[in-house]
Every structure is written in structure tokens, then in C-alpha cells.
Image: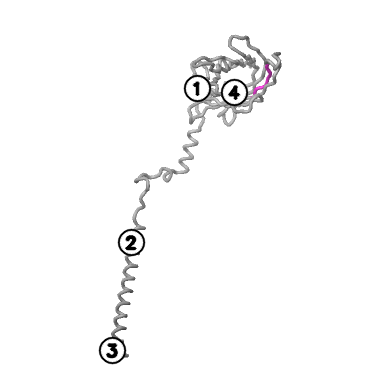
């Protein structure tokens, strides 16, 4: 091998060693950067604000839900509904006109540990038929009343055999007047919404009255139904 060839090989070997060294150094630097980046704390995208859901304790959250839904003193009012009642139902077709009274029966009991009063209503009433003559309609209804400890309101639902919707109300009870006043929206056949309220007045352990009123003008209410509940015991 000539000296010139030896010099070329030596030069190539030197360049190869330098290249290998550069690759090794680059790998070491890259590994250090990556490792350091992995060790650094991750930054929250919300400018340092931590997400609340990341800190919630599932057991504590469940305990909070249970505590918020415990029976409250307001549930005691529901006991006044309990029992078997004779009902006198009077319907008023228009203001100033005489009402049509009919008889019915109602049974009510507390359910789910006293959280709700569940009552069934059965009876009949008279109303004008298509030809204007009075006809008798059989009526059945089912309602539930409770106190929502989250909303701090009394709540109720009602269904019956003369409707296809679920009527809902919310309201408050006044211990001084012994009245529970509930408000709800009722849809009319023409698609409009009518403000409605139910007023329950408890005059004793064996009697209470329910009035249903509709708002015919702002602040003006028309009583279109009254039911008087009584019992002997």
C-alpha cells in the first residue's frame, strides 16, 4: 500500500471518528433534554387553575348527596294528606255562574319513608255535552306531593284519565295560615300557556280544601274548581 493511500485512509478514519463522536454527543444532549422535560411539572392549560373534579372525593361527594336529601321538618306537613277522604267537587264553568257539585273519594298514604304523599282520586262530575245537555264524566287521577330539600320548595305531579300530560307544580307552605300554595303552567288546546295555582287550606285534621285557579288577566284569578275533603275519623 502506498504512503499516499495510507494517508487517505487515515484521514477518512479521523473524519469517521469525529462523526461518531458528534452523533454520540447529540444523543446524550437529546436524552438529557427529554429527561429534563419529563421531570418538569406539567402546566395546566387553564393558567394555573386546577380542575375541581380532579380533587373531588367520590365518597365525600356521595355523603354530601345523602345529607342534602335527608328528611326535613317540612316533610311533616305531608302527614295532613294521609287517610281516606270523602270529596265534594264543585266545577265552575265561568265567573259568576253557579257551580256543579259531584262526589268522589280519595285515598292517600306516605311512601318512601315519608318523603312523599301519594294519593288516588276517583269520582264523577257533570259537564255540558256536545249538545249542551249535562252529562256525567267518570274521573280518575293520581298525584304525588313532596318537599324538595335541594330546591327548598314543595313539589307535586298529577296525571288523570282526561289528559295526556303530566301536570307539575311548585310552591310554599305557610304555617300561620295552614295553606300550601302551588303554581304551575297549563297548556290550553290552542297552544297557549295558562298560569294556574292550587291552594290547599287545612282547617283541621279531618278537613281540608283544594281550590284550582287560573289567571284570566294579570293578577286576576278565577276559581274553576273546588274540592272539599272530609272524613269521620
Q: Is residue 174 magenta?
A: no
Q: Distance between the Cα atoms at labels 3 and 2?
A: 45 Å
Q: Residue at x 65, y 12 (%)?
A: 100
Q: Distance between the Cα atoms at labels 1 and 4?
A: 30 Å
> Is label 2 in a helix, a strand or a loop?
helix
Relative placement, left or right, of 229 versus 15 is right
Relative depth, front residue between 103 and 99 = 99
Magenta stretch mostly in which secondary structure? strand
> Is label 1 in a helix, a strand or a loop?
strand
User: In the image, which residues are magenta?
Assistant: 120-125
Q: Quadrant of residue 83?
A: top right
Residue at the front extreme?
4
Where residue 26 sits: x, y (%)?
Answer: 32, 67
N-terminal-most mark, 1 or 4: 1
Q: Distance between the Cα atoms at labels 4 and 2?
A: 72 Å
Q: Nearer the viewer, mark 3 or mark 2?
A: 3
The tag on residue 33 is 2
Residue position marked by numbered label 3 in the rendering: 3
N-terminal-most mark, 2 or 1: 2
Quarter placement of the C terminus: top right
N-terminal-most mark, 3 or 2: 3
Amino acid at each position: 500500500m502506498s504512503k499516499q493511500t495510507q494517508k487517505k485512509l487515515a484521514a477518512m478514519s479521523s473524519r469517521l471518528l469525529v462523526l461518531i463522536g458528534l452523533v454520540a454527543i447529540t444523543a446524550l444532549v437529546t436524552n438529557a433534554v427529554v429527561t429534563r422535560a419529563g421531570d418538569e411539572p406539567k402546566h395546566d392549560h387553564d393558567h394555573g387553575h386546577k380542575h375541581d373534579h380532579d380533587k373531588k372525593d367520590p365518597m365525600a361527594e356521595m355523603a354530601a348527596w345523602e345529607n342534602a336529601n335527608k328528611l326535613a321538618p317540612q316533610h311533616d306537613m305531608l302527614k295532613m294528606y294521609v287517610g281516606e277522604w270523602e270529596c265534594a267537587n264543585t266545577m265552575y264553568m265561568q265567573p259568576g255562574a253557579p257551580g256543579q257539585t259531584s262526589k268522589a273519594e280519595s285515598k292517600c298514604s306516605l311512601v318512601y319513608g315519608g318523603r312523599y304523599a301519594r294519593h288516588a282520586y276517583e269520582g264523577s262530575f257533570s259537564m255540558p255535552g256536545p249538545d249542551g245537555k249535562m252529562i256525567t264524566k267518570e274521573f280518575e287521577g293520581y298525584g304525588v306531593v313532596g318537599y324538595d330539600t335541594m330546591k327548598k320548595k314543595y313539589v307535586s305531579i298529577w296525571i288523570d284519565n282526561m289528559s295526556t300530560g303530566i301536570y307539575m307544580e311548585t310552591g310554599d307552605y305557610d304555617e300561620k295560615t295552614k295553606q300550601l300554595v302551588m303554581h304551575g303552567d297549563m297548556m290550553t288546546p290552542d297552544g297557549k300557556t295558562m298560569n294556574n295555582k292550587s291552594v290547599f287550606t287545612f282547617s283541621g285534621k279531618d278537613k281540608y280544601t283544594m281550590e284550582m285557579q287560573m289567571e284570566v288577566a294579570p293578577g286576576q284569578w278565577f276559581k274553576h274548581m273546588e274540592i272539599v275533603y272530609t272524613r269521620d275519623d
